[in-house]
Image (cartoon, rainbow, N blue to C red):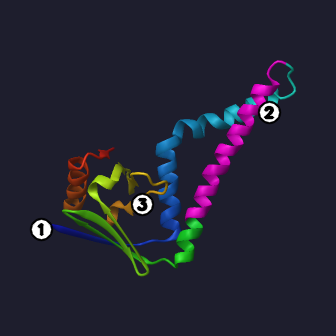
Amino acid sequence: MPEHRAKFIYSAYLVRGAYAAYLWRRSATLIVVSPMLLLWSLFELKSGDYAWPAGFIGGATVLLWGAWIGGYRRSAQTAAALGNPEVELLATEEAVTFRMPHAMSVVEWPGIATLLRLRRFWIFVRVGMVNPSFVPVEAMGPEMRAFIEGKIRQAGGRVR
């Protein structure tokens, strides 16, 4: 039974980089367009014809950026509070396991909805979970990466 292991330090620096990469991959268009929408809404707030849509769009843009910045800060604060633990990633025929000194998360392959393969990070998006798991690409060898991709595809998950 094949078993692949990788270890990496779960630091605030790693999480900030991974979260920013994940956010850019997921919402690049909105990140680029939203400042223009905010500026338009600020200019049109005094207009009689466009005041209410401008206020709505401006408020939605501020909420969106608040959620992005809040998620970025929360993820980095959580990683810092953990004290930079070493994470062991274990991939077997049945599941993928994320193990830290005081916590462990086991996800069977069908429980991974999407694997986002970014240049520096792989992001595991689980079924029904909001917070993804980040793994630096440099921590995994080519055999491990191929094994994980194959198991996720075999279980019906998406690999992007």
Does the magenta run of residues contain 53?
Answer: yes
Q: Which residues are magenta?
A: 49-75
Residue drawn 52% across and 40% down?
28
Residue 68 in percent (x, y) is at 61, 50
Q: Quadrant of the C terminus?
A: top left
Judged left or right of residue 69, residue 119 is left
Judged left or right of residue 110, residue 59 is right
Q: Residues within 10 Å of mark 3 (few under 14, many from 20)?
A: some
Residue at mark 1: 1
Residue at mark 2: 42
- Classify mark 1: helix, strand or loop: loop
Q: Residue furthest left?
A: 1
Judged left or right of residue 136, residue 52 is right
Would residue 141 be visible to someone looking at this image? Answer: no
Q: Work out whether residue 97 or residue 120 is closer to the camera in this orientation and state it.
A: 97
Residue drawn 24% across and 47% down?
153
Query: Which label lies toward us, 1 or 2?
Result: 1
Residue 38 in percent (x, y) is at 72, 35
